[in-house]
Each structure stands twice: as C-alpha cells, then as structure tokens.
Amino acid sequence: MRTLQVDLGERSYPIHIGSDLLSRAELFTPHIAGRQVAIVTNETVAPLYLEKLTQTLQGYSVLPVILPDGEAHKNWETLQLIFDALLGARHDRRTTVIALGGGVIGDMAGFAAACYQRGVDFIQVPTTLLSQVDSSVGGKTGINHPLGKNMVGAFYQPKAVIIDTDSLRTLPARELSAGLAEVIKYGLICDEPFLPWLAEKMPALRSLDASALTEAIERSCAAKARVVGVDERESGLRAILNLGHTFGHAIETQMGYGVWLHGEAVSAGTVMALEMSCRLGRISTDERDAAIRLLRNAGLPVVPPADMTPEHFLQHMAVDKKVLDGQLRLVLLHRIGEAVVTAEYPRDVLQATLAADYR
Ligand code: NAD
Ligand code: MG
C-alpha cells in the first residue's frame, strides 16, 4: 500500500492506494467518529462491493443507500434520496457518509455530506479509474443542473480517500480509458516525464497490470494533491486541472449527459486545447501529435462530434465556470508539462480552433 497526504492544514487527509484495501478496517476506523455509517453507492456497484465493505465495517450501524446509476441521475432528485435515507434512519451529526462508486457517487455523496445537518464526515472510496485519480481528491462536490454541468455544489474535503485498485477489475474497458484521459492530463499540465512513462506502460495499464496501475494512480494523485494544496478553492492554479474540460463540457452538454463519458469528452477537448496551444506557437506540431497519439492509444476519442459547430461550442462555453466578468478563460499549454489559464488570446485563434478539421 502507498499513502499520500493532501496538505490542507486542519483539513489534511490521507490517500491510501493498494490492493484489497476494502477489507482493511483499520484504514476506515480512524475516520469514523460515531457508530452510524451510511454507504452511498449505486445499483451497479452495490452487487460488486457493498457486501465486502459492510463486512469490513461490522460493529457499526451501516445504512446502505443505493442510488440509480448514471450521470443523468446526478441531480436534485437523487440527492434528495440520500437525505431521505439519512433522516429516515435517524442519522445524527456524528454519522459518516462513505461514497462507494465512481465520480458521480463521490460528487453526490460528498455534496450530501456537506449539506446534511450542515456537514458530516465523509470518506471517498472511488471505484473507477477516473474517480481514483481525479474526482475523489480535492473536495469538489456537487450535482448537475439542466443548464450546466456541476453548477450546484460545495467545496468539502473528505476525511480520507481509500483506493482499492482491485475494484478496477470489474470496470468496463471504456470506463478505464476514460480515466486514462485524466491521467494523461497530469503529464501535460505538470509532469512532463510522466508522458514517456505512460506511452511505454499504456499496454500494461490497459491490461490492468497492478504495479503499473498503482504507479499511475499514485503519480496522478500526487499531482492533484500538489495543485489542490496550493489552491484549494480555485482562485488560481487549480484551474489548470481543467485542461480540455471547457471544450469537453461543451461536448457533454451538447450530446446530453452520459452519451459521451466525461473522460471521452475531456480527451477530445484536450485535443482541441493542444490544437489551440499549437496555433499559438506554444507547442510544436510534433508535440501535439505525440500527445494525441497517447490519447488514441489509451482507447480514447480524439475527434470532437462531427455535427458540433463552433456556435454550439461557444454557446455552451459561455456558461462555463471559467467565465469571469464576461471573459472566457481557457486552459492552454505554455509548453508540454506546463499549463496556463488565460483570457488573453486572439479571438480568431479560438474560432479557428473550433472550426479546425480534426479527422
Ligand atoms: P461514474 O461514476 O458514472 O462511473 C462510471 C460507471 O462505472 C458507472 O456506471 C458506475 O456505476 C460504474 N462503476 C463504478 N465502479 C465500478 C466498478 N468498480 N466496476 C464496474 N463498474 C463500476 O463515472 P466516473 O467516470 O467515475 O465519474 C464521472 C463524474 O465525476 C462526472 O460526473 C464528473 O463531473 C465527476 N468529476 C468530478 C471531479 C471532482 O473534482 N469532483 C473531477 C472529475 C470528474
Ligand atoms: Mg475531469
């Protein structure tokens, strides 16, 4: 097992990464204050891992909260089901919410924990690669609104993140690839040497080689922890984590939540950010193409949806959270391994990027 620390003063917490951690009670108990525990999960993950985690937590009063599966359910109605369950079982302020599932469950359970009785403890047990390397770390929680993704939420840090790499064995290959989009992102924005390592290990990662996965997860979490440690509430640096996300969110919104996976949209969005960085002379065409190859070899789409026009993109990007005072800020590469957030770019370069032929 490897352990990292997210340094946020009194809100600091450990990230444990390793095999069979779901059965290790001693990783959970230090973070559970009372006798009540609510495990928030979904219809897909519950049959796979709920019983195992419940066994590990015997001695506590465990309330399972099983939600419908999917990004389309990351909304108020589903959030309400969590409160219904907690109140119905008379959970008090000392209860601990455990998120057992992917990013959708983590974001919703975390937001519920932030709100329930003005805040109860919560533990992230991410079971998708994307949630293990990204959404479970850093304390962003929330739900979607019909007019925009993740538009309602709170910063709320977990007490611990417990990553059982064995859970990836049941994950569909398409979901694994989606997670790899975020892994590759870390190399592009802040860890250049990670990229050749990833290129070499990509077959091992895709065939679930345990040591390659552990290393990739650890390195990704370390990058995220570093950025979040500097800028917890996204007043600056943290925005670099959104490389490819402004374009990607536009794709997700246009196509309808859940049609493109988050990581797939981020991949195509990253290609657009690479293209724009290249057009601005920040990276070479060779560097752009190497990064695109890496995404493609991870099993990811590298072409935005054919029927999406520049107008579609601009319309969705206008409600992006990175719009401040009417200025659309974009995450671009200053060079490979270093990202910048900027509103200073020629408008026509953005237009050309949106209109470019990616096939
Ligand atoms: P997800 O939670 O929808 O999980 C993907 C699918 O895999 C679901 O069907 C899920 O039930 C299933 N699944 C989960 N674990 C499994 C397992 N071990 N075996 C088999 N199936 C399993 O999607 P995701 O990609 O994990 O997360 C995407 C969400 O995360 C988006 O809503 C996105 O906005 C959010 N996100 C949040 C942050 C943040 O900082 N909070 C960062 C990135 C993404
Ligand atoms: Mg993301």
Image (spheres, grey):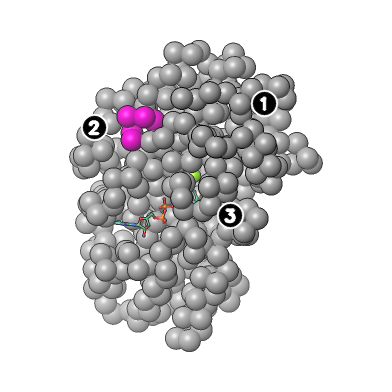
Which callout, 1 or 2, points to the residue nearer the camera? 1
Circle 2: is it few (<14), some (14-19), or many (20+) Cα within 10 Å? some
Secondary structure mainly formed by the magenta segment: helix
Give residue 203's mark: 2
Mark 3 Cβ inside 8 Å of ligand 1: yes
Q: Nearer the viewer, mark 1 or mark 3?
A: 1
Q: Mark 1 points at which residue?
A: 351
Q: Which of 121 and 207 is in front in this view?
A: 207
Residue at the extreme front of the image, as rendered: 307
State the residue in front, 161 or 213.
213
User: Could one spot residue 16 in this view of the protein?
Assistant: no
Location of residue 293 with respect to 18 vertically, above or below? above
* Residue 146: x %, y % from top left: 62, 59
Q: Is residue 297 magenta?
A: yes
Which of the two labelled residues, at mark 1 and mark 2, occupies the earlier sequence position?
A: 2
Q: Which of 98 and 329 is in front in this view?
A: 329
Residue that label 3 marks: 150
